Image (spheres, rainbow, N blue to C red):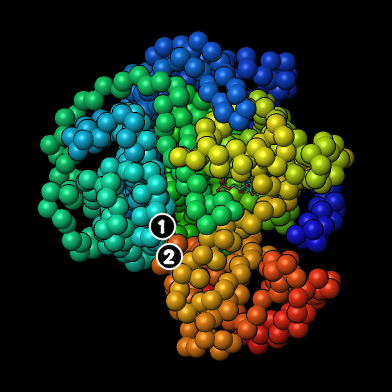
Amino acid sequence: MADEQHDTIDDLLAEARTFPPPEHVTRDALVTDTALYDEAAADHEGFWARRASELVSWAREWDTVCEWELPFSKWFVGGTLNVSYNCLDRHVEAGRGDKVAIHWEGEPGDTRTLTYAEMLDEVQRFANVLKGLGVERGDRVNIYLPMVPEAAVAMLACARIGAAHSVVFGGFSSQALADRIDDAEAKVLITADGGYRRGEVFPLKPAADEAIAHTPSIEHVVVVKRGGNEVAMVDGRDHWYHDLMETADPTCPAEPMDSEQLLFLLYTSGTTGKPKGIMHTSGGYLTQVTYTAKYVFDLHPDTDVFWCTADVGWVTGHSYIVYGPMSNGATQVMYEGVPNFPGNDRFWEIVEKYGVTVLYTAPTAIRTFMKWGPEEPAKHDLSSLRLLGSVGEPINPEAWMWYHQYIGGGRCPIVDTWWQTETGGIMISPLPGVTTTKPGSATFPLPGVVAEVVDDAGERVDHGGGYLTLTRPWPGMLRGIWGDPDRYRETYWSRFPDRYFAGDGAKLDADGYLWLLGRVDDVMNISGHRISTTEVESALVSHPGVAEAAVVGATDPTTGQAIIAYVITRGGADGDGVTAEQLRAHVAAEIGAIAKPKAIFITPDLPKTRSGKIMRRLLRDVAEGRTMGDTTTLADASVVEELQRRAAESPQED
Ligand code: WTA
């Protein structure tokens, strides 16, 4: 890791280009001076309290802005609100019911348009459906859906009645779904027959069936019809969404919820095999996502068409498809499918078709577009775009420049937004009307966020590399790990006293700009998705033919990192009939296709220290084709030579 960081730092030091906000942006931008920064620096809690009262509608005002008992925070304590009221009713009441909330584009080319009034109607009905199935305030509901509007409807319906949703990305396997349902003890599962991906229907209900065969807590399953594929329905347990909606009562008043009412759980990978159920509550989270969606994307709800290309199964989809944009009453695009169906220009066709003004996507997607070439965006009129965003992993300066030039036409500012499932909303980012950007830097903490880089000893670093920490509580911060307060404390608050440690390396340049340097723990970042090495290792060793496995994330030009696995089989060097292909399929079945190793090397041995610890650094060196550094601590140095030989002989690619 140390070597890799050095490479990154060296590259970044060469980056001297700067981009001040262009005049056409500052003319109409919501923020054009440092007033918000000054206000937050002068009075942290007062700053957030003013945002909460300006941006969120409360049924009852809070008594206390923040209760902070490190590491547990509560925000707007005593206040009550309804999150779905904030995202829907208040816009309709203000006469904006006919405004489009979602322009939905199905992958095959079918479309749906939902206004705020229509969304409100659907959400009320579905909230009543959930109540009819016995869902009560405080219950958990699992959602396992493709990118269809019903995903947003289901989430908002849960919020309306005070049930917490736990969305599981549709690409996760039945096993991963079952683990998450069990941990949350969810009562109801909302899924679909199937969804579209790369021109074909992928079945979801069969995976859901497999999962709930092992999850005693699920009482009912609601199935959205999307793929049209044949599915089995269990009488009394399984119900079609459209059948239930047809007879549902159309009114379900938004009841005020406590500010600290659990809004959702979202599972994310940590450094152990068991995913963590990150807890987010209502008032603070909504304040943070409404504030960041508004100012980072400089949202002008009357004219903007916002498009966040994430899936609702990830936190980016929660905060910047559902809650942030809708709380602001914005119009957005929601797209079901992949960027290369039917052609490599699908995204640009969508931008042109809907007149997208603000596009929020991931570096891995940008690097893929770079591979496909500038001729793809050139086929379309992208002049509606005025602002671009990036999220999920460090964006390399080359990708930044390409995005700026070929997508933004050289005129759109880029907001590189750093945040995490745990932070709830964006933490470090430029504000487009004030911040001079540098390609590859997330620039500065937002007003209201206090971040510091520290060295190994926890001493503050003002210039140079170290670890990114957060030193003040913020309203959207996680409230804990579901069912495991000790793990919460241990994971985020034990490495440096009194600081939240994010798990990311970062450096500050001479101008005080922050540059993110990637994860410093055993969490990989594959195409912007967090996957822990331990999780993939556990999946591999759960195969009967595998004795031992070591997994590393190796630098990959497109996906940021790629999963490389080294496996010792029970049968010895030749795998006793176990093939790399079988093991890849096994990992896909255990976790999901996103966790499938790019390459698996079957090896007689793994490099270990004398105390028996696997030397991941060496494995990364092998995977990235570097010559070996110091192997003197190795138990058996010849292992590495053998691995290199195998790596050279058997390249495996997707
Ligand atoms: C990484 C996604 C550099 C980081 C919102 C973080 C980034 C992890 C950026 C969280 C960025 C996210 N620059 N790295 N702009 N945004 N990351 O929980 O390593 O899926 O810790 O949340 O993604 O991933 P998560």
Image height of 60 relative to 311, above or below: above
* Residue at x 72% of width, y 34% of height: 497
**Residue 429 appears in the picture as rendered:** no
**Residue 278 appears in the picture as rendered:** yes
Near mark 1 (Cα within 10 A), the count class, few <14, some 14-19 or many ≥20, is some
* Separation of residues labelled 1 and 2 (CA atoms): 7 Å
Q: Which residue lies furthest to the front in this view?
A: 611
Ligand 1 under 8 Å from disc 2 Cβ: no
Q: Name the residue under label 2.
A: 590
- Residue 625 percent location from the top left of the image: 74, 75
- Residue 380 percent location from the top left of the image: 52, 55
Q: Mark 1 falls on what kind of element?
A: helix
Q: Name the residue under label 1.
A: 176
- Residue 494 percent location from the top left of the image: 67, 40
Q: What residue type is labelled 1?
A: Ala
Tag count = 2
Image height of 131 relative to 110, above or below: above
Q: Quadrant of residue 354?
A: top left
* Residue at x 49% of width, y 17% of height: 77
Q: What residue type is labelled 2?
A: Glu
Ligand 1 under 8 Å from disc 1 Cβ: no
* Residue at x 49% of width, y 62% of height: 594
Q: Mark 2 falls on what kind of element?
A: helix
Of the pair 171 and 502, the residue shown nearer to us: 502
Of the pair 449 and 381, the residue shown nearer to us: 449
Of the pair 7 and 307, the residue shown nearer to us: 7
Q: Quadrant of residue 100?
A: top left
Image height of 344 relative to 140, above or below: below
Question: Pointer 1 and pointer 2: residues touching (CB < 8 Å)?
Answer: yes
* Residue at x 57% of width, y 28% of height: 72
Q: Give the left or right position of residue 68, taking residue 193 as reference.
A: right
Numbered mark located on residue 8 in the image: none
